[in-house]
Each structure stands twice: as C-alpha cells, then as structure tokens.
Image (cartoon, grey):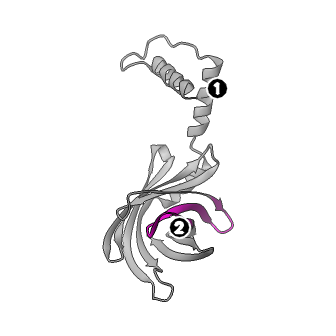
Amino acid sequence: MKTQLVALFAFAFAVVGPAGAEDAAQPEMTKEQQEMAAAFERMGAVRAEHKQLAYFIGDWKTKNTMWMDPKAPPQESHGTSHSEATFGGRYIETKFDGDMMGQPFSGRGVMGYDNLGGKFFSTWYDSMSTGFFLAYGSYDKASTSYTYHGSMDDPMEPKTKVPVRAVVRIVDPSHYTFDWYETRNGKESRTMQIEYSK
C-alpha cells in the first residue's frame, strides 16, 4: 500500500508539474491509478456529517463543574472556547482557555467524521498533560447528542487505562453540554460537565 501511495503522489506531481508547467503534456492514468484516485476522493469528501459539525463553530463561554470527591461539593470554574472549521470543513478545531483546580488551563481539540471508519471522532490535549485523548463515537438524532468512547491514562496509576464515555448534547442553537464519565472498579460516574453558551 505504501508503494501505491508513493506512486499516486508521484503521478499527481507529474500531472500538475512544478509551478509554471500547466501546459505540459499530461500522461493518461492507468486503471489502478484511476481507482486509487477515486478512493482518495471518497476518503476526503466533505459529507453531511462534516457539515453537521459546523454547529460548534464560534465563540462560547463555559461553566465547568468537576466532581473530584463524591462526598465533597463540586468545583466550579469558567472559561472560553473558540472553534473554527479547517481544511474546507473537514475538521473543527477548538481552543479552550480557563482554569482548573485553581490553575490556569488551556486545551486544544479536533473533531471530525472519518469517512473510512464511518464514525465521528474527537481528540484532546492540554496544558495539564503530555499525552492526548482520542475517542470515536456516533450521533443520535432523537436526543441530538454525540456519544464518544475512549480511554485515558490514570495519573495515579500511569500504566492503567480508565474507560471514558463522553456525551455532547445540543440543547439549542446557543447552548450545548459536555459530560465526561469515567469507569473505575466497574462503576461509571460523571466526573465533569461543561456547559457551553453563546
């Protein structure tokens, strides 16, 4: 497959050519190259699922609630979030700034829809870690919500993975919520909620 990709990119360069070579003779594509080009086109197509994610574009204010200890009151903080479309609407990139546990906090994320995998996905990395989070999910039209499943490293036990379920629910054009659930010792509990508003 790697050889095929190299061949396709080499062919594409030969067709387009360097700057100023638009009039150069263009070789005919073989059947295999045509099929590969069609596959790349399908893989990179902007579909209805990508356009659906445009809802998240814009500037949002956030109210963050964290349950660090079930026996203690939750911790609350506020922040701002800015999201914009990239690569022709194929991805939504998010920049978050606020505070967490009394410390300045910044995070970055990307969400999109994987045409090949047939799933929505969400990534996240921030100023309180050196790794990143990846989750895949689906959209439920009846509840206007996205549900993602992934796993995170346990900071208290670095070699242990904690199953995570994240639910993003669209309330109305100006409000949505993000709920984060962790499963520990076989029991799932909500540890964080972020309320977004415009």
Write down the quadrant of residue 80 in the picture: bottom left
Q: Residue 27: percent from the left, percent from the top?
A: 53, 12
Earlier-in-chain disc, 2 versus 1: 1
State yes or no: residue 155 in magenta.
yes
Residue 24 percent across, percent down from the top left: 44, 12
Residue 136 visible in rendering: yes
Residue 9 drawn above or below residue 117 = above
What SS does tag 1 mark?
A: helix
Task: Identify which residue, 57 or 156, lies in the foreground.
Answer: 156
- 59 vs 98, nearest the viewer: 98
Seen in the picture, residue 179 relative to 95 is either above or below; the reply is: below
Residue 116 covered by magenta stretch: no
Contact, mark 2 vs mark 1 (Cβ under 8 Å): no
In the current view of this chain or complex, which residue is farthest to the right?
A: 142
Q: Which residue is pictured at 45% across the width and 72% down the height?
A: 197
Residue sticking out furthest to the left: 104
Q: Which residue is mark 1?
A: 35
Point 45% across, 84% down: residue = 74
Where residue 79 appears, as percent x and y from the top left, is 37, 71
> In the rendered structure, which amino acid carries the disc numbered 2?
Pro
**What is the crowding at mark 2: few (fewer than 14 residues within 10 Å), some, or many (at least 20)?**
few
Q: Secondary structure at mark 2?
A: loop
83 relative to 183 in the view: left or right: left
- Given residues 110 and 180, the one toward you in this image is 180
Residue 95 appears in the rendering: no
- The mark found on residue 8 in the picture is none
CA–CA distance in space, label 2 to label 1: 41 Å
Q: Is residue 7 left or right of residue 126?
A: right
Residue at x 61%, y 44% (from the top left corner):
115
Secondary structure, magenta segment, majority class: strand
- For the record, the magenta segment spans 138-163
- Residue that carries the numbered disc 2 in the rendered image: 173
